[in-house]
Image (cartoon, rainbow, N blue to C red):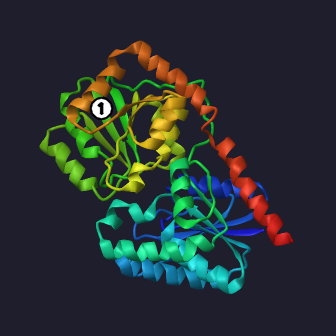
Amino acid sequence: MKIIATVINDLTYDQRMIRICTSLARAGYKVELVGRILPHSKPIIPQLFQQKRLKCFFNKGKLFYIEYNIRLFFYLFFQKTDVICSVDLDTILAGFMFCKLRNRVQVYDAHEYFTELPEVIQRPVTQRIWSWVADLTIPKIKYCYTVGESLAEIFEQQYGVVFSTIRNVNYRQNQKHSFLKNNSSDKIFLYQGALNEGRGLESMISAMQYVENAQFWLAGEGDLSQTLRDQVSALNLEHRVRFLGFVLPEDLPELTKKAYIGINLLENKGQSYYYSLANKTFDYIQANLPAIHIGFPEYQRINRAYEVAILVDDLETKTLLKAINTLMMDDSFYKKLKDNCNKAAAIFCWENEEIKLLDIYKEIERAIQK
């Protein structure tokens, strides 16, 4: 069975799709991951599956989404495949049209609550367009999955189809060296992910003014890259805040093990953020790294089962400092969270989620063979 998965990024840093496609390839399926090439894209890293990047004239805005889906549709039209796995709404329309014309199976992989993203809800016309796309396509797709239980429940109510939950988790990590000391005496607070709006990064940087013997490391880039650097410069925090830039997926586990606290702070800028379950949550767990999370539903769900973090209700400086000081000064509590991370890591690992993923595609394969 041939599976083509479609995304809108340049593939290089998409840990989630690399894991998914690798698992499918190891299970014996022919797999191809299709994305796009950007002006500064690095060469494709060879994987167990095929990779293809489409080149677009436009790289942002409405014209980009229209162009990309047109190019994607015509690329798919000339491919021999059994299944199209459309990742998020921004690639679903091309896959939907192709599958209808060619009588192929479409899978919908909802990585996020797309119509409730901050950049979407701030533009009412744009939100209506994407909602129309969702209403047109998702109710007609039989095989759907998403990254968290909350989103699965919401999507099932909204679109009337069953959504499975395939968490965005990493492989089980070697636990023998779960904490590597930094070269300096400073303790490292680590954020990994996009430097975008609504991630609470401005608040965390502000709090670093009042934290001694610690550094805040940011692994990633994004829309706020320059804004955050300007903030650090204005506050004279260059000695406490370090920008690492993009970090390759294979280098993240060792980097994460160097940290003392993982940071995952979101602002309530829409239901997509409120019901999110970031993959960094599980990266921190796999590294036995106690974390500070915003107290949204999915993080509450995890912390009720395995206390692996401190949850904060807001991003006020005094709130963040209280959480930071608790983890830095209460050694017994910190050790308790580390031990809980080790227990949770055996549950929240890709080896477990992979089983559920393969069950979905085995069901599709049986349906095709009938």
Q: How many marks?
A: 1
Decide which of 357, 29 is in the foreground and name it. 357
Percent position of residue 194, x then y: 38, 52
Q: Decide if residue 325 is on the left or right side of residue 18.
A: left
Residue 287 in view: no
Judging from the image, what secondary structure is the residue with disc 1 in? Answer: strand
Q: Would you say 126 lies left or right of 161 here? A: left
In the image, residue 277 sits, relative to residue 30, either above or below, namely: above
Q: Amino acid at mark 1?
A: Gln
Quadrant of the image for the N terminus? Answer: bottom right
Q: Residue furthest top?
A: 332
Whether 176 is drawn above or below 312: the answer is above
Residue located 29% across and 66% down the image: 122
Residue for point 53% across, 69% down: 35
Dot 1, crowdedness within 10 Å: few (<14), some or many (≥20)?
Answer: many
Residue 20's x, y, as percent?
64, 55
**Residue ID for mark 1:** 215
